Image: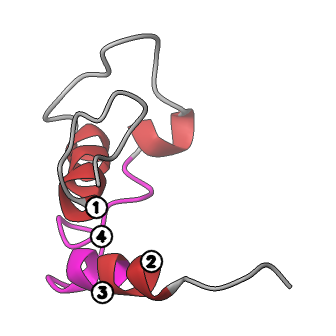
Amino acid sequence: MPYMHNGKFATLGKALSHYEELAKGKTKPLVGTLDPKLAKGVIQLGGGGGSKDDLKNVVEFLKAQTGTQV
C-alpha cells in the first residue's frame, strides 16, 4: 500500500523515515514550511532523540492498529 497523499513511499517505514529526515534537517518539505515542533526535531525517532529501534517499533505499533472503531 502506498503512503502519503501522493503514494510517494512504498512502505510505512519509508514514510516515517521521511519525517525523521525532515526533523533532522536533512531534507526540505516540498511545499510550505514545517510545523515548528517538527522543525526542532521533536519527533526524531532513533536518529538522535531515542533508541535505534524506535522507528521499527513505531511501524510495528501502527501496523497492529486494526479493527473497528469503538
Q: Quadrant of the N terminus?
A: bottom left
Q: Which residue is mark 1?
A: 12
Q: Secondary structure at mark 2?
A: helix
Q: Which residue is mark 2?
A: 62
Q: Which residues are magenta?
A: 41-58
Contact, mark 3 vs mark 4 (Cβ under 8 Å): no
Q: Earlier in the sequence, mark 3 or mark 2?
A: 3
Q: Mark 2 or 4, which is nearer the eye?
A: 2
Q: Given the current orientation, which residue lies at the most extreme right position?
A: 70
Residue 62 image offset from top left, x and y in percent: 44, 77
Q: Which residue is mark 3?
A: 57
Residue 2 image offset from top left, x and y in percent: 28, 47
Q: Is residue 40 above or below residue 31?
A: below
Q: Secondary structure at mark 3?
A: helix
Look at label 4 and name its amino acid. Gly
Label 1 crowd bin: few (<14), some (14–19), many (20+), radius 10 Å: some
Q: Earlier in the sequence, mark 1 or mark 3?
A: 1
